[in-house]
Amino acid sequence: MAQLVFVDLETTGLDVDRHGIIEIGCIFETDGQREAEDFHSLANPGEVEKSAEAAEVHKIPPASIAAAPPLEEVLRQFDKRCQDEAIISGWNTKFDEAFLYRAYQRHGIPWRFDYHIFDVWSLYKRFQLLGALPADLHLGLGTVAEHYKLIREGEDQHRALTDIEWTWRLHRLALKPQAALP
């Protein structure tokens, strides 16, 4: 069975060509089991544009980003944990995959991931379309995690490791037959 790499990134903005990755949070699942160690690191993306709007969302101090290891080093550490043909997974996965792919290209790291992605958001959109979730429920990660009471005290949204933890919990919940369907 393929490895699922649940990944969440915090970035300096929304444009893959102008902005960069500043935080990576990952949960690895192999053969249906969560691996013992997650992966988390801040990263210094080097000379990229930094959006004030993004900084307001993730609230990572600029000094912490400046002191973080270079993005290339963090990507190589992350890549060592990934199996060949691993499937990138997450919430709104296309965004994270695009930034990750672009960063791999910039740093000359071979892209070893499967061409498929697994987006947990899509499962919950399907549940909503089937009437198992309110039609007016905004399908943001925090909103859905809160709806299912999966948020624990002290967890802050818009930090990579917390966001991917919520995503993984929603993934596991969706696997339960009674989880979301009427």
Image (cartoon, helix red, strand yellow):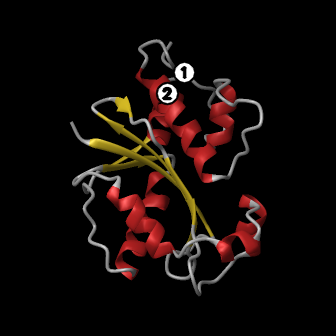
| Mark sitting earlier along the chain (2/1) | 2
Q: Quadrant of residue 32?
A: top left
Q: Is residue 51 left or right of residue 75?
A: right
Residue 9, can we see it?
Answer: no
| Labelled disc at residue 132 | 1
103 vs 160, left or right, is: left
Residue at (57, 69) in percent of width and height: 43
SS label for mark 2:
helix
Q: Which residue is mark 2?
A: 127
On the image, the x and y values in percent for residue 96 come to: 48, 59
Instruction: Specify whether residue 129 is in view.
Output: yes
In the image, residue 57 lies at what x, y percent? 74, 60
Mark 2 vs 1: CB contact within 8 A: yes
Closer-to-camera residue (42/57) = 42
Please state the horizontal and vertical placement of residue 80, each as a whole percent of the image. Answer: 33, 58
Please state the horizontal and vertical placement of residue 108, each as a whole percent of the image: 32, 80
Residue ID at (56%, 59%): 41
Q: Amino acid at mark 1?
A: Ala
Q: Residue at x 63, y 34 (%)?
A: 144
- Mark 2 belongs to which amino acid? Phe
* Label 2 CA crowd tier, 10 Å (few <14, some 14–19, many 20+): some
The answer to whether residue 152 is left or right of residue 5 is right
Counting labels gives 2
Q: Label 2 to label 1, Cα distance in Å?
A: 5 Å
Which quadrant is the N terminus positioned in?
A: top left
